[in-house]
Image (tube, rainbow, N blue to C red):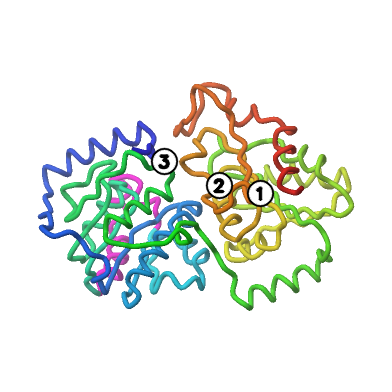
Amino acid sequence: MIKKFNPQKTKILKFLNFVLSIFFHKKKSDSIIDIKKCKKILIIDPTLIGDIVMLIPFLRIIRKNTKDAKITLVCNKWAKDILHNQGLIDGFIFVDSKILNSPWAFIRNIRYLKTVYREINREEYDVSIEPRGDLRYILFMHYCRAKRKVSYNYTGGERLLTDIIIPSNTVKHLVEDKLFFAQKIGCDYEESDKYPKLYLDDDEIEENDRYKLEHQLIGKTIIGIHPGASLEIKQWKHFDRLLERLNNENTVFIIFEGPKEEEAVARVRNSAISVKAQFITSKTDIRTYVRRLAICNLLICNDSGAGHIATALGVPTCVIFGPIDPELAKPYVENEFEKLRIISKELECKPCLSTSCKHNKECIDGVTTEEVFTKVMSLLD
């Protein structure tokens, strides 16, 4: 069974599950769920950008197995920008995942949640699905109008579900975890369905062509660098030195900046200025970010959503991992040798799902510029 929740969070959720089990008991279904017969499907997944990209194979498989069904996704707002024009979702309902992080936040924001539930419960669904097995989202799903409610029981929630999926003992990656889930609810899929893939529409391709002309990028090697990550413990600090090693007259760097990443980007930008590199700084909305990634010949990034988006677009990508086990959450790609390089230190304290470190962040700070440079050049060559 894969370990996708940190131990402290798991203990809290298990205790919450014990409390909930006193008050709730959902009658279990007598029949095995057959997703192919469902006409209205609700999927609950208000997670981070990388998680949404890793959800794409699951969504594609659900769509292929239920062609006439209406599929609604409850998610954070950025999910719609990522899944724009992919033909996977019929309707989006937004919820701020921070409100679901604890029972107290849930209670404090009950008025806001009532408006979300009103939108969800305008119709009744044949099935609602929470594909992560996160008790917080299972509790949220409990108040949605659906005949069947199905999820994993990683952190509990059995009393809130009509159908429980027992996790596999052989699955190692988060994408495979969702593929296993899809099988258990009656889905068929082919090998090509297993991998996250994103596509630009014709207007976006034309806009990218104009952008390359405007910035004189035709004929250049375009290297994207995204030095930020959701947690400080995941951020490698030497992208500036790496840029200096990679700089040449035929290379243009696009330095991507996300929320609260000003300091990390400033280091790389200052380095680019000092060595007179050709570079563009890109701070945009998420959909434009997806388009800009698509023009890169290569992306270098930390363990973040950036790597998942880039590989889903077919962009060769080099990802620097810190505390997380790459086998759990690395970009899931076909032809991995041609498209992906992973840098990850082998340490006794890894994998670690903590947000702080007792070992001087050796997992990320111990990665050398030379290690990353060698991996990057193997992709460029």
Q: Position of residue 167 (x, y in %)?
A: 29, 44
Q: At x 62% / y 65%, what residue is drawn?
A: 288
Q: Position of residue 252 (x, y in %)?
A: 81, 55
Q: Position of residue 364 (x, y in %)?
A: 60, 31
Disc 3, SS: loop
Amino acid type for the residue under numbered disc 2: Ser
Q: Position of residue 220 (x, y in %)?
A: 82, 59
Q: Within 10 angstroms of label 3, few (less than 14), some, or many (20 or more) residues?
A: some
Q: Nearer the viewer, mark 1 or mark 3?
A: 3
Quadrant in the picture for the N terminus: top left
**Considering only order in the chain, which callout, 3 or 2, is on the residue closer to the N terminus?**
3
Considering depth in this image, is 112 or 208 the residue closer to the camera? 208
Q: At x 32% / y 71%, what residue is drawn?
A: 66
- Asked whether disc 1 touches disc 2, contact meaning CB atoms under 8 Å apart, the reply is yes
Label drawn at residue 108? none
Which residue is labeled 3 in the image?
A: 172
Where 154 falls versus 204 (above or below)? above
Which stretch did the figure color magenta? 96-122
Amino acid type for the residue under numbered disc 3: Lys
Q: Is residue 380 left or right of residue 26?
A: right
Which residue is labeled 2 in the image?
A: 304
- Asked whether disc 1 touches disc 3, contact meaning CB atoms under 8 Å apart, the reply is no
Q: Give yes or no for residue 108 being in the magenta stretch.
A: yes
Q: Chief secondary structure of the magenta span?
A: helix
Quadrant assignment, res 111: bottom left
